[in-house]
Every structure is written in C-alpha cells, then in structure tokens.
Image (cartoon, rainbow, N blue to C red):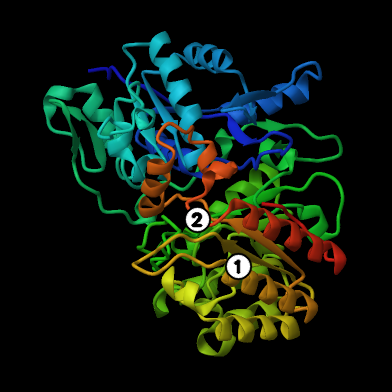
C-alpha cells in the first residue's frame, strides 16, 4: 500500500543579527543529518534554507535585497533571507506531506514562530515538526506549558527532543498511520491539555546516515572546477575571516565539521548535551570525502565542543582523525574551542600533535574569565594556572597557528555563589592585557553572558517577561548581571582598543 507521507521538507529560518552586522551563515548540519536519515529510509527529503535561499537570490539578482530591517522595542535587527511570504510560497510549491522546522538557538525563536504560523495558515492540514537544540531544551514552553505566552509556538504540532536522527523515521511512520501505536521516543506533543513527552531515545551517531551535503544550495564560481556551497560563497562563518587565517584571497571552500556530539562537562553557561559520543574515524572521513567530492575543501573547522576530550578510547579516535586529516593535506582550525583540560592532558599531547602535523591554522582558546573564583562558580574544568601553562606551551610550539582567546563577563549569582563583581571584571581585563602583551594570544574576544541555559534564561524571562527572543542574545536587554550594563560596554571598548593598540589581526568579531 502506498504511503500517505512521501515528501519531507525541513525549513530553516531567516538569520538574525544586530542591524549593521552581517549574520553568521552556516550549513544547517542538524537539518541535513535528519534529512539524510529520512532519505535513507525511503522518503523524499528536501531542504529549504530561508537565509541561504535569500542570499542566493540576491547573488543571482542584484536588484533583490535579502536584508530587511525590523525594529523590536525600537531596537533594529537585520533579518537576512527570504521574506516570510516568499518562504511560504516556496514551501507550498514543494508540496510537502510533513514540514520540519529547525530551531537551533534562542535567536531563532521569533523567526521560527512567525514562519510556522504562516506555514500553518497556508497548509493547515500539514503537520509541523520542530527540531534543533533550542527546541529540545524548551519543548514544554514551545508547546504551551509556560506562564509567558511569548514562549509558545501554537503552530508547531510536534517537537523532537534530542538528536533527530533516531526519531525521524519512526515519527514519519507514526504520522502516516497514527492508529498503529504510540509516539516514538524522542517526541513531545500537546495531549489532553498537557505536554506529553515520550522519553529520550538512545543515540549513537554511527547507527545513522551521515549529513547529506548534496542538499545544500550552491553557486557556480568562475575559475573553479567545482561549485561552491552557498555558505562558503558568502564567506562569513563561525571561524571568521578564513582568508586572513590562510593568507589567501578569493572563494574558500569551508567545511564546518562535527566529529562528536556533546561535551562531557557541565559548565553553568552552556546548554550543550553533557554526554560525549563520537563518530567512528571511517564515518568522519566519509563526511569529509563527501563534501570534498561536491565542493572541494580549503579549510576544515572542527566545531566539536570537546574534540580532544573524553576517555582514552574517545581521545584515541580524535588523534586518529587528526592523523588522517593531516595525511590528506587539509588545513584545519578549532573555532568552537578546545577544552584546556584536553590540551593539558598527557603532557600537552594534543598540542604536540598539532605542532607535529603543522596544519592547525586557528585555535579559539576558551579562557572564559580571569578569576579562579568565577571559573569555579561556573564549573569550568580549568584554573588560571592551567590556562597560562597551555598558552605558554602553545606560544612556543604553535607559532604558525592563529591563537585567539575568548572571555565572558557578566555572570549573575550562580550555584549559590555571588555574582561576578565589577572588580573581577577588571581582573579579567588585566589578564587579557597580560596574555596579549606576552604574546600568549594573538587576539582576545570579550562576550557578555547570554542567558541560554535554563537557570539563566528563567532569570532573564522574569526580568523581561514580554521581550522578544532576539534580545536574549543581541541587545542590552540580555543582561541578568546585577551591576550596570555600562561596565560591560566599557569592557567591550577596552578589549577592542587593546587589540587595535597591540596590532593584533582580529579574524572574527562575535
């Protein structure tokens, strides 16, 4: 018997950024992983990336502006991509039997809500499934279990909680024949006036399809044998100015790569899954080879939260990946950071490997703060002593690697400990100055804490019960710090100034 559900389309929202700042545009790795698994099980799987499609339309038609300025509480934002009505028209034209939507970060929430509402109005009988990290963390709120109406997305019918790969095929089968049984594990929905959740599924990445990069939009570039994926063509990824890092001009084929999921640590400001699970080496190389075959590769950016971490087996896999990647001649970097714990272990074994391979062009060192008290409070697995030792070793042994440190300030009361004090903020600046003057770092980035974790987000929502979610990441209404925001503004200015004064080549601005 023919299935009623054949075509599954995943929609990713427009990109959001402060007005005047181009957004980071990345391949939607979660979406193309879930679509790959659906395709492996016989479904027609399509990606509709609203941000990328809008940018591509602007490339092909110079009269089209993919950026719209939208004011929220008189704060201007850029919304980059297709307009909502264009998204709806494009998705309706694809005639999906089920619509998936991706909500990866807090800043996606507003765009996802508007887009889902418009899609549901256009196709009221088509189920909408929401997935992504932000959706997983806040599925109850999204489905209506919240005292803050702004958090609910009524147009969403189901939320996938956790990784989508082990869930999507069973959920599509359930939607095809709902009378056959209960919801599969990993799904939340509204049921009898409450939120019903079926429990988390087991997830081992190697049991499922690898990301399907052929789904990505692409553009032809004169002088290149292969097309470029649209994200490489736009050239504003998480890693920043890759051309500066590599010392080359022109289009750069850039692969953001996840070889693992989760972290293994429990830092208070990060909502990453605490479990650390990895792809096998052969599957990691399959991912690299597939992307290379489609687009070529000039640079691989490892996006793992803890690439060199975990137990001895986990670390051995990481070192084998490094060996094969270096043997294939790829230039690499780590813009999402490497834990100091993983870099210091086994007498700096990881950094020694980098030095031996000679292909690591950029490392973002997650220093986080210049105070041991604050580091303990936020449950960071390192001390300032460890930070100094790692940075000193890197200075001596990774002289061709762009070494960036990132720091966070504005921590509120956490784990029963008092909030970061203004004098501690100043101590972080002194530590940044020390690192730059001693050339332990080439540049420093200072970030204001964004309240993404459950503890901090609840505090933020209590302070700003009707604030748009865009403010949670990008505006002065981000703050949950009990001291004046002007101190954080001044910190940003001072860090920018010292980077400029010492002549550092800042490859990215966050």
Pinpoint residue 7: horizontal percent, then vertical percent: 40, 22
Q: Is residue 46 above or below residue 487?
A: above
In the displayed structure, 105 sits above or below 498; it is above
Residue located at (43% from left, 30% from top): 101
Q: Is residue 16 left or right of residue 240?
A: left
Q: Which residue is mark 2?
A: 481
Mark drawn on residue 166: none
Nearest the eye: 32 or 296? 32
Residue 11 visible in the current orientation: no
Left or right of 450? Residue 377 is left
Q: Identify the secondary structure beneath mark 2.
A: loop
Q: Which residue is at a point 79% across and 40% down the rendered structure image?
A: 225
Kind of element beneath mark 1: helix
Circle 1 residue:
425
The percent coordinates of residue 236 (x first, y second) are 71, 44
Image quarter (top left, top right, bottom left or bottom right) of the N terminus: top left
Could you give the CA–CA distance between mark 1 and mark 2, rounded to whole angstroms?
12 Å
Who is closer to the viewer here, 175 or 426? Answer: 426
């Amino acid at each position: 018997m023919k299935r009623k559900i054949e075509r599954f389309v995943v929609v990713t929202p427009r990109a959001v950024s402060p007005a005047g700042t181009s957004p980071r545009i990345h391949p939607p790795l979660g979406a193309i992983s879930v679509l790959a698994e659906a395709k492996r099980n016989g479904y027609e799987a399509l990606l509709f990336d609203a941000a990328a499609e809008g940018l591509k339309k602007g490339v092909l038609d110079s009269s089209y502006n993919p950026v719209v300025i939208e004011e929220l509480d008189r704060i201007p934002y850029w919304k980059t991509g297709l307009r909502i009505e264009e998204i709806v028209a494009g998705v309706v034209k694809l005639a999906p039997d089920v619509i998936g939507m991706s909500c990866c970060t807090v800043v996606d929430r507003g765009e996802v809500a508007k887009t889902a509402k418009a899609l549901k109005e256009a196709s009221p009988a088509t189920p909408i499934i929401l997935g992504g990290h932000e959706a997983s963390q806040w599925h109850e709120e999204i489905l209506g279990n919240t005292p803050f109406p702004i958090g609910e997305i009524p147009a969403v019918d189901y939320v996938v909680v956790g990784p989508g790969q082990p869930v999507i095929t069973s959920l599509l089968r359930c939607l095809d024949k709902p009378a056959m049984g209960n919801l599969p594990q990993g799904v939340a929905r509204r049921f009898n006036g409450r939120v019903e959740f079926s429990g988390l599924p087991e997830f081992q990445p190697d049991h499922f399809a690898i990301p399907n990069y052929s789904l990505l939009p692409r553009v032809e570039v004169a002088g290149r044998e292969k097309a470029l994926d649209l994200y490489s063509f736009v050239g504003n990824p998480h890693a920043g100015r890759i051309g500066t890092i590599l010392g080359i001009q022109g289009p750069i084929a850039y692969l953001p790569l996840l070889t693992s999921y989760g972290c293994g640590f429990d830092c208070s400001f990060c909502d990453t899954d605490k479990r650390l699970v990895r792809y096998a080496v052969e599957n990691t190389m399959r991912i690299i080879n597939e992307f290379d075959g489609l687009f070529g590769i000039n640079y691989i950016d490892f996006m793992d939260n803890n690439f060199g971490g975990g137990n001895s087996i986990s670390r051995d896999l990481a070192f084998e990946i490094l060996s094969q990647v270096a043997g294939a001649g790829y230039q690499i970097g780590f813009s999402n950071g490497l834990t100091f714990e993983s870099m210091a272990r086994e007498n700096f074994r990881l950094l020694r490997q980098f030095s031996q391979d000679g292909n690591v062009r950029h490392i973002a060192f997650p220093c986080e703060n210049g105070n041991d008290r604050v580091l303990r409070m936020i449950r960071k697995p390192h001390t300032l002593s460890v930070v100094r030792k790692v940075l000193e070793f890197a200075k001596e042994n990774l002289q061709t690697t762009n070494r960036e440190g990132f720091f966070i300030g504005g921590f509120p009361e956490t784990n029963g400990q008092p909030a970061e004090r203004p004098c501690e903020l100043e101590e972080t600046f002194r530590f940044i100055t020390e690192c730059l003057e001693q050339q332990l770092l080439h540049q420093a980035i200072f970030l204001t804490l964004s309240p993404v974790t459950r503890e901090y987000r609840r505090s933020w929502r209590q302070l700003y019960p009707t604030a748009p979610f865009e403010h949670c990441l990008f505006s002065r209404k981000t703050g949950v710090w009990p001291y004046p925001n002007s101190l954080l503004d001044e910190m940003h200015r001072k860090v920018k100034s010292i980077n400029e004064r010492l002549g550092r080549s800042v490859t990215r601005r966050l």
